[in-house]
Image (cartoon, rainbow, N blue to C red):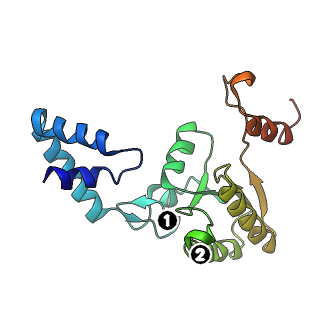
């Protein structure tokens, strides 16, 4: 039973066998009510959370709160790789448009193409003439850049303006501790100082 739990916890990203073992023994020795609470919450989530019919984020409803919020800007569409990216952007309090969640990035080697990312759905949205700007917020990885380029080409087909979130040196970061690729990206993406 403990080995089965260890394998289950080890499926989580960043959780190896030793970390899983610590979780298990903590719950079994010190917090059985907490373990039961986790189990119940996990079962509830697995049974009730689904993808939003419009943006594909995770929600308990057919249409998520952001998509159903009439005060959001319907002309801006921010493209993200995961639902957790929405959470991070929303915490900034700056963006007021809508989202589209890819749930990954293009990776033909792994069998992830346009259909798996819902890019056909995205093309329908772009073809509706309601969107004036697509904001590409994919990760600054090779796969993220390839995916952003693909979406940019798709948006151009419908004359939709495409912008890319800035990548570079984080606020409070020091140049001497920043890797060369980040510095190169920050220099090439520089803008006028206002």
* Residue 133 as seen in the image, left or right of residue 39: right
Q: Position of residue 93 (x, y in %)?
A: 57, 38
Q: Identify the mark nearer the N-term, 1 or 2.
A: 1
Q: Is residue 122 above or below residue 103?
A: below
Give the left or right position of residue 105, taking residue 153 as reference.
left
Q: Position of residue 28 (x, y in %)?
A: 12, 40
**Count of labels in the image:** 2
Cβ atoms under marks 1 and 2 closer than 8 Å = yes
Kindly state the secondary structure of the residue where label 2 is placed. helix
Q: Residues within 10 Å of mark 2 (few under 14, many from 20)?
A: some
- Where, by quadrant of the figure, is residue 113 drawn? bottom right
Q: Nearer the viewer, residue 35 or 51?
A: 35
Hey, which quadrant is residue 51 in on the image? bottom left
State which quarter of the image contains the C terminus: top right
Marker disc for residue 164: none
C-alpha separation, residue under disc 1 versus residue under disc 2: 10 Å
**Looking at the picture, how far across and down is residue 62, in whole percent?**
40, 68
- Locate the N terminus by quadrant: bottom left
> Height in image: 144 above or below 116?
above
Instruction: Check disc 1 and report the residue beneath it.
Output: 56
Residue located at (54% from left, 49% from top): 85
Name the residue: 64% across, 77% down: 124
Q: Give the residue at x 84% y 36%.
A: 187
Q: Which residue is mark 2?
A: 121
Disc 1, SS: loop
Q: Residues within 10 Å of mark 1 (few under 14, many from 20)?
A: many
Question: On the rendered structure, is 125 left or right of 103?
Answer: right
Residue at 76 percent of width and 53 percent of height = 163
């Amino acid at each position: 039973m403990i080995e089965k739990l260890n394998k289950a916890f080890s499926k989580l990203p960043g959780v190896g066998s030793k970390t899983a073992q610590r979780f298990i023994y903590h719950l079994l020795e010190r917090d059985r009510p907490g373990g039961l609470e986790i189990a119940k919450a996990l079962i509830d989530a697995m049974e009730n959370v689904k993808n939003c019919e419009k943006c594909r984020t995770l929600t308990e409803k057919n249409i998520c709160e952001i998509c159903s919020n009439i005060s959001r800007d319907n002309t801006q569409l921010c493209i993200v790789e995961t639902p957790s990216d929405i959470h991070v952007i929303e915490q900034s309090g700056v963006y007021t448009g809508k989202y589209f969640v890819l749930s990954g990035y293009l990776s033909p080697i792994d069998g992830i193409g346009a259909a798996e990312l819902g890019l056909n759905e995205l093309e329908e949205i772009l073809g509706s003439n309601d969107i004036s700007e697509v904001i590409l917020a994919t990760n600054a990885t090779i796969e993220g850049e390839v995916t952003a380029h693909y979406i940019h080409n798709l948006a151009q087909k419908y004359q939709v303006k495409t912008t890319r979130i800035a990548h570079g040196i984080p606020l409070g970061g020091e140049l001497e501790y920043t890797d060369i690729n980040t510095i190169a990206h920050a220099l090439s993406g520089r803008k006028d100082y206002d």
